[in-house]
Amino acid sequence: MDTLSYKTISANKKTVTKEWVLVDADGQTLGRLASQVASMLRGKKKPNFTPHVDCGDNVVVINADKITLSGNKWEDKTYIRYTGYPGGQRSKNARELMDKNPTAMVEKAVKGMLPKNRLGAELFRNLYVYAGT
């Protein structure tokens, strides 16, 4: 047997097996939860991981309104956006954002940990975040 004949297996859209994963965010820290979810979306723990292919799982996060932040981050952490108009920079702290849209904090944290290209946008579509159970 020729041991040099092993081939590197590269996953593609037809050979990828996608599963559904349920993650409960109740009592979990935002950053640690987001890094685990981003890794699942990317498929980094799978043996057939291929960097340029969507080989991750579909992830459903529930209880997003019950995440925790350490220290004074509820008041100090700011989320900045720009309206596109002069003087249109708006900011909210974590408490205000959680009151307005409980799922936005988890979505923003996970999206920031995904690649900034078309693959990242495709991976982000596999994430479903819900505030309640």
Image (cartoon, helix red, strand yellow):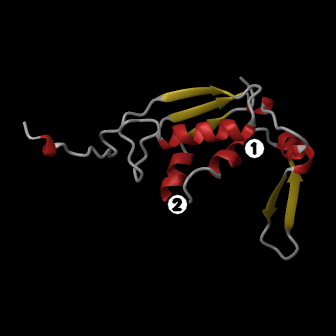
Identify whether 103 is placed above or below 133.
below
Q: Quadrant of the C terminus?
A: top right
Tally of marks:
2
Amino acid type at mark 1: Met
Identify whether 49 is placed above or below 133.
below
| Mark number displayed over residue 35 | none
Horizontal side of residue 104 vs 78, given as left or right = left
Foreground of the two, 92 or 2: 2
Q: Quadrant of residue 115?
A: bottom right
Q: Position of residue 110 (x, y in %)?
A: 64, 45
Q: Position of residue 40 (x, y in %)?
A: 53, 37
**Residue at numbered disc 1:** 105
Looking at the rendered structure, the secondary structure element under dot 1 is helix
Q: Position of residue 106 (x, y in %)?
A: 71, 41
Q: Quadrant of residue 71?
A: top right
Work out whether mark 2 precedes mark 1 in sequence or the reverse, and give the earlier one.
1
Q: Position of residue 53 (x, y in %)?
A: 40, 49
Amino acid type at mark 2: Asn
Horizontal side of residue 61 vs 26, given as left or right = left
Q: Residue at x 25, y 46 (%)?
A: 8
Q: Residue furthest bottom?
A: 86
Q: Residue at x 68, y 44 (%)?
A: 107
Looking at the rendered structure, the secondary structure element under dot 2 is loop
Q: Residue at x 60, y 37 (%)?
A: 36
Q: Residue furthest left?
A: 1
Q: CA distance from mark 2 to mark 1?
A: 21 Å
Classed neighbour count for the residue bearing mark 1: other residues with Cα under 10 Å, few (<14), some (14–19), many (≥20): some
Horizontal side of residue 30 vs 73, given as left or right = left
**Residue at numbered disc 2:** 117
Q: Residue at x 71, y 41 (%)?
A: 31
Q: Quadrant of the N terminus?
A: top left
